Image (spheres, rainbow, N blue to C red):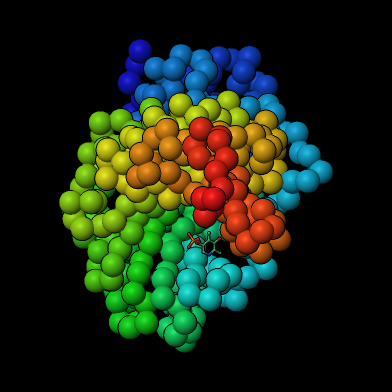
Amino acid sequence: MTTITRSLKSVKALNEAGLIDAPASDRLTPVGERYAVAITPDIAALIQHENGDGPITRQFVPDLAELTITNTEREDPIGDEAHSPVPGIVHRYPDRVLLKAVHICPVYCRFCFRREMVGPDGNGTLNREELDTAIAYIRDNPTIWEVILTGGDPLVLSPRRLSEIMLALKVIDHVKIVRFHTRVPVVEPQRIDDALVDALKASGKTTYVALHANHADELTPQARAACNRLVDAGIVMISQTVLLKGINDDASILADLMRAFVETRIKPYYLHHPDLAPGTSHFRLSIEEGQKIVAQLRGNISGLCQPTYILDIPGGYGKAPVGESVIRQTGDGCYSVSDFTGKSHKYPPA
Ligand SMILES: *Cc1c(COP(=O)(O)O)cnc(C)c1O
Ligand code: SF4
């Protein structure tokens, strides 16, 4: 197998690199015209290894099903627009804001919830003036305790650009936490070098990195080493995973992933129910199916490995935990609570 050394950024490039054949390339061209495509060399190597189909292939290689839009899907599935006071800022909760400095990613996930906003033709990266306005918004709102850099993928920015943003946050006393949401440690691990780590920490604030990964196969030795460099530098890592049909909708696959996170010193944080992004119905399962899978994790694997199952309520109403409730009132001031094997117990005991 030939080693792919450059990012593949079109259906044609995927064909030329041998990841899809010529008929597939013809079929998928309209998908590539509709939604951004990018696959890094590290991810291409995993796809080559899967040889046609598998959990990594399905996440990144376009599929004809993306052209099917169902009537519940929407361009802005989680309602970012409803809470954007200035370009690049989403302020939905009182104590934290999203800062979307960049709209490009090193890879484009086929199920992306922001697929109408990210990509080379997306809303573009904030220019200097817009970035100044966004920082001023944070400075002028003392309830903002945490700034969450997302996008796009903020770790595609150069260390110099990232440091500039971090130094601007450094002087805002009420900001105590800076969090980055990224896929870079997995999809482009060599990017996590000393210069980038220093840039991430340049705010002097407590720094979190939330790693987006959906299958244990993504946590290659190189990816784990990249995460080690972050954690060794004093950055706290948490995970986010999207529950995806045909990729990780199985308790043992999720258990392997959550254990791989914990082994890498990444605390499992959120397991997202897939959002109603256009052309993603082939990835979606029902909430009930999701609840069943999540319930199988409880008790069977370490408490360290338990993510919270989350639904982002369409329209901009925020996130809600949607795991099955294990406790109910029985009317006599008592409760019935079920253990991890499904057996019910009275609380307090009679
Ligand atoms: C998801 C999200 C956050 C972060 O939520 P946490 O529950 O703190 O992880 C913040 N703001 C917006 C607009 C979000 O969509
Ligand atoms: S990395 Fe995140 S923002 Fe970028 S395409 Fe994937 S899901 Fe979307």
| Residue at x-position 57% and y-position 75% | 86
Placement of 62 over or under 235, stated as above or below: above
Q: How many marks?
A: 0
- Residue 154 in the image: x percent, y percent? 41, 56
| Residue at x-position 33% and y-position 83% | 173
Foreground residue among 1 and 348: 348
Quarter of the image with the N terminus is: top left
| Residue at x-position 53% and y-position 67% | 88
Placement of 202 over or under 135, stated as above or below: above
Q: Is residue 249 visible?
A: yes
Rendering quarter of residue 191: top left
Q: Is residue 60 visible?
A: no
| Residue at x-position 38% and y-position 62% | 179
Which residue is situated farthest in the right direction here?
Answer: 71
Placement of 254 over or under 20, stated as above or below: below
Which residue is situated farthest in the front direction here?
Answer: 350
Left of 8 or right of it: where is 90?
right
- Residue 264 in the image: x percent, y percent? 27, 40
Placement of 79 over or under 302, stated as above or below: below
Rendering quarter of residue 169: bottom left
Foreground residue among 89 and 145: 145
- Residue 214 in the image: x percent, y percent? 46, 36
- Residue 156 in the image: x percent, y percent? 38, 51
Left of 85 or right of it: where is 183?
left
